[in-house]
């Protein structure tokens, strides 16, 4: 699979852009799409999913122009929108049958597929209860099941881990890594730890533009040798934060241990191994 996004912009109002001249090539594997709220992640994903049309630019899947031929995308797509809604009066099986009908999926394989997904997502015990009685995490898992109904070759999850507890996050991660062999999986998040253990490639965006794209090592290289930790007294903390890019502050022995990014470390700072969180913070703060 090959998804090419070329110079895509989305204008919502006269001077309000959700996306600006955005270009990115995506190949098989898991892409983690990171960016702060308002970066344009949902705007981009909705255009890939053919829910919205770009104001300008081109999107192709395996060289097919999906703006002209959206069905080429839709046939192979699974999409979990950020604001996914469920029907509270249906149970999980009824809801998935309904979604299958909307997607034109039917036949003898459907019911076993639904049961398989409900088992994989640990929903089988509640499958006959109305979705309105589910917790947020359970509803989210119904949304994930819906995305996978048609064994998609391109699966897009917009902020999928919102509302999931830590155990559910692990289960979701396992499910995704099984999926990604010969297809494109895109996971968006504003939280690095949601994607860093599973993403083959990472794209970081802000203000409707791409900041960087590549494997994790390539992105971490931006801050290699520039991550330090140093103790800071409580009364100096806010001045320190104003001057430096601070990744985290943790309490230790009555003072603060600050992890920060700098090219000119102060004397008692200790160098630390850089990680994706450091790089994400650095890149989104300095771009
Ligand atoms: N339907 C809309 N109408 C007007 N502006 C929008 C609409 N959807 C998104 N935007 C704006 O586009 C920008 C990108 O939003 P969005 O794609 O939702 O970002 P993200 O998903 O990264 O949080 C934001 O400034 C947002 O306010
Ligand atoms: Mg969003």
Image (tube, helix red, strand yellow):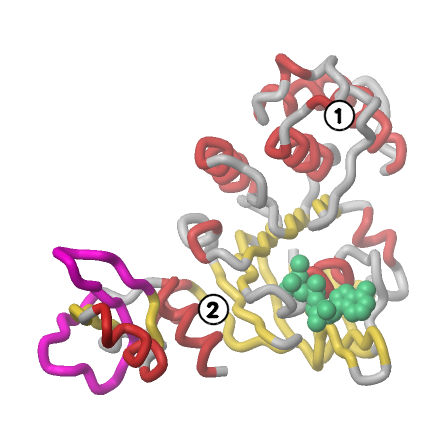
* Left or right: where 34 falls relative to 96: left
The crowd level at tag 2 (other Cα within 10 Å; few <14, some 14-19, many 20+) is some
Q: Which residue is drawn at 74% across and 43% down?
A: 84
Q: Nearer the viewer, residue 72 or 160?
A: 160
Give above or below for 50 relative to 108.
below
Q: Which of the marked residues, 1 or 2, is nearer the chain's N terminus?
A: 1
Q: Which residue is drawn at 57% across and 54% down?
A: 28
Q: Nearer the viewer, residue 93 or 75?
A: 93
* Left or right: where 57 falls relative to 210: right
The question of residue 264 being in magenta is answered with yes
Q: Which of 75 and 207 is in front in this view?
A: 207
Residue 200 visible somewhere in the drawing: yes
Residue 281: x, y in percent? Answer: 42, 70
Q: What element carries label 2?
A: strand
The question of residue 175 being in magenta is answered with no
Q: Is mark 1 on a helix, strand or loop?
A: helix
Marks 1 and 2: which is nearer the front? 1
Residue 208, by quadrant, is bottom right
Residue with the mark numbered 1: 132
Give above or below for 191 relative to 280.
above
Residue with the mark numbered 2: 214
Point out which mark residue 169 bears: none
The crowd level at tag 1 (other Cα within 10 Å; few <14, some 14-19, many 20+) is some
Q: Distance between the residues labelled 1 and 2?
A: 41 Å
Q: Which residue is drawn at 70% across and 36% down?
A: 143
Of the 4 image quadrants, the one containing the N terminus is bottom right
Please report contact status of discs 1 and 2: CB closer than 8 Å, yes or no: no
Residue 257: x, y in percent? Answer: 20, 64
- Magenta-tinted stretch: 248-272
Give ligand 2's quarter of the image: bottom right
């Amino acid at each position: 699979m090959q998804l090419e996004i070329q110079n895509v912009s989305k204008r919502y109002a006269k001077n309000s852009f959700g996306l600006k001249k955005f270009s990115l090539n995506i190949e098989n594997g898991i892409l983690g799409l990171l960016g702060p709220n308002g970066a344009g992640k949902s705007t981009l994903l909705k255009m890939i999913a053919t829910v919205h049309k770009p104001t300008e630019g081109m999107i192709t899947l395996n060289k097919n122009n999906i703006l002209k031929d959206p069905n080429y995308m839709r046939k192979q797509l699974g999409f979990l929108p950020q604001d996914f809604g469920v029907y509270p009066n249906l149970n999980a099986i009824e809801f998935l049958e309904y979604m299958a009908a909307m997607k034109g999926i039917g036949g003898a394989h459907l019911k076993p597929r639904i049961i398989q997904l409900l088992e994989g997502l640990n929903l089988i015990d509640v499958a006959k209860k109305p979705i309105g009685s589910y917790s947020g995490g359970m509803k989210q898992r119904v949304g994930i099941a819906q995305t996978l109904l048609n064994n998609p070759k391109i699966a897009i999850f917009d902020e999928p881990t919102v509302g999931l507890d830590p155990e559910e996050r692990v289960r979701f991660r396992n499910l995704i890594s099984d999926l990604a062999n010969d297809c494109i999986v895109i996971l968006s998040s504003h939280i690095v730890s949601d994607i860093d253990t599973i993403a083959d490639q990472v794209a970081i965006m802000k203000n409707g533009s791409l900041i960087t794209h590549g494997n994790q090592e390539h992105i971490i290289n931006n801050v290699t040798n520039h991550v330090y930790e140093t103790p800071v007294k409580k009364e100096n903390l806010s001045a320190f934060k104003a001057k430096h890019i601070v990744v985290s502050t943790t309490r230790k022995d009555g003072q603060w241990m600050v992890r920060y990014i700098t090219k000119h470390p102060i004397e008692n700072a200790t160098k630390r191994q850089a990680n994706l969180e450091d790089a994400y913070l650095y890149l989104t703060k300095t771009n």
